[in-house]
Amino acid sequence: MSVAARLNAHVDGAVDGRPMVFVHGFGCGQQMWRFVAPAFDDHRVVLLDLAGSGGSDVRAYDAARYDRLEAYAQDVVDLLVELDLDDAVLVGHSVSAMIGVLAHALAPERVSTLVMVAPSARYIDEGDYVGGFSEADIDDLLATMDRNHLGWQAPLAGMVGATAAGGDTGVAAELEESFCRTRPDIARQFASLTFRGDNRADLARVAAPTLVLQSAVDVVAPPEAGRFVHENVRGSQLVTIDTVGHSPHLTAPGATADAIRSFVDGGRA
Amino acid sequence: MSAPHRPEGVEWSLLPGGALLLDDALVVVAANHAMLDLAARPEPDVVGRPIGDLLSAGGRIMTQTHLLPMLRRTGRIDEVALDVVTPDGTRVPVMVSATRDGDVTPAVVRALVVGVSERRRYESDLLRATREAESARAAADALAVALQATLIPPAPPVVEHLDIAAGYRPAGDGNEVGGDFYDVFQTGGRSWVVVLGDVSGKGALAAAVTASVRHHVRALAMQHADPSEVLRHLDRTLADDPTDHFCTLALGRLDLLGDRWRLDVSLAGHPPPLLRRTDGSVVEVGEYGTPVGLLPRPEFGTVSLDLVDETVTFYTDGVTEAQGPSGMLGEDGLARLVAGAPHDARAITAAVVEGALAHQVGLASDDIAVLTLSPRLGRLPG
């Protein structure tokens, strides 16, 4: 199976435009970018669902493989190779900002500019470092997820029904509604990988022009965490979006797109 | 951007459950009395703050990573189990449902927050019980796999003047233990016994019965030369066993008689082994018998034949009942695999195992066990 099919990749926009790869974070799939990605249709826009998330092929999910972020980064690089794209801007939200760091390290010629949306290199406090959470907080997250499968079991029946009725649109609607539903064991593993990971040392490896975008108020990736990323990625630019929440691309899509565009097309990248 | 219109009136404030009006970034615009009671906070500590400030860390993260995106996409969330944390650190389990109203500008979110302490205790008990059941099942699976590993010898013994090649593939992903087994052991100077069988059922109990059958065959074969006698005694032993399991098996006794091997075969409800001659022709050997441990009046017979340069292949029904896109492999399909292979014990066993797997596109729906014998009489003892 192709990498594109496995990751439910969609390629759109200008054929000769500079590639921009939008990678969603922990939680929901590529639909997270729906208010921002269309603003870049003068670029080659690549959207994907990380292995195990959104509309990716969960049959291809191998728990032993996806126990490190490098595996996700390798997927992104493999996709770019398959699509024959290089010199891409990787726009990564949350944990995928770090996936971007690793993908850039794996293939600097493929991933040559990074846009980090609400990044954190480490979610757990340690000494003077402020990540915003304790180990117990992450245990609490996993327990909360165990109690909430958010309808993971529900959509399959609906999809079968829609298929039987011959309604492709029904299937599409179900898929869209299920974009935040992840198989519970996969969600648990990805949450643990995301929130227990430590990518602080990887930041020094970044040699790409980098934009760090953060929200004015973000309880998941606090301002201190964003500033740490900015200070540890050489030459990076920090922009704070005046919005509340961990997903400025949802709560302030216009300002988010503007900031990305002025960075990417403004000569800095 | 103007602030959302705040709800008014006694009805809202006195609802017997928490009610919240939130802006589109999930910052609290208004909270009713029950909500303030749940949070154990005065209104100024609730209104104007992100809803995450009222929740545990897990709920705070989940709100941002899942609930807000879902509200934006589908306009609602239903029955989400979260914990409100009061200023003194007490956790209050709540159930939250919310809808987003995008028809007004700016959009608003209305949420019901209902305390569910009792229900949560019950759910936690269920969750714990499920975990325990899963871990018990995993332990049982591991035990069965370990037990079965002892029932399938890693390699058949080396027997002078006889080539023996065995193959075994567990069903499916290998987690479910079936009852296939084989064994080759010596009963005298030039006498050997070959047994290949299939205990009914799956799992740890079937594996335990298999171990017992294998043990009894070894003991009985020391006392009785005739394979059908061994089966008769085994039948009684298994019939007395309190478990419901029964067993099919093919039992062969091999005696080296100078210039040939004498093979005495007896069958217990098991498909007959296939004899292949050097010209590639294939015939069944043995006469059908009843399974052991199943019927009140079992019947077993022994058939004798001499082997010089023939091969004999024992197999379990996982081979012939292999289901593929073109139907079952069947006895004919098996005979073709045996006939098509080079005249060699290892090659025939490999051809049968791989052929059966290929027939069902790689994933065995039942265990497959195959064992092939062929005399190697190059230099004969006196």
Image: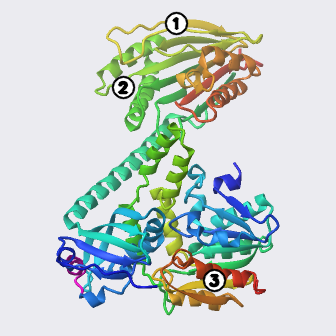
Q: How many marks?
A: 3
Determine which residue is flagged by label 3: A201
Name the spot of residue B316 as percent of width and height, x first: 54, 23
Identified by mark 3, the residue type is Ala
Look at the numbered disc 2 and give the secondary structure of its residue: loop
Residue at 70% over, 23% down: B348
Q: Earlier in the sequence, mark 1 or mark 2?
A: 2
Residue at 43% over, 44% down: B141
For the residues labelled 1 and 2, say whether their Cβ atoms are less than 8 Å apart: no
- State the extent of the magenta-drawn residues as a range: B34-41
Determine which residue is flagged by label 2: B245
On residue B287, the disc is: 1
Chain bearing tag 1 is B
Identified by mark 1, the residue type is Glu
Residue toward you, A96 or A123: A96
CA–CA distance in space, label 2 to label 3: 60 Å
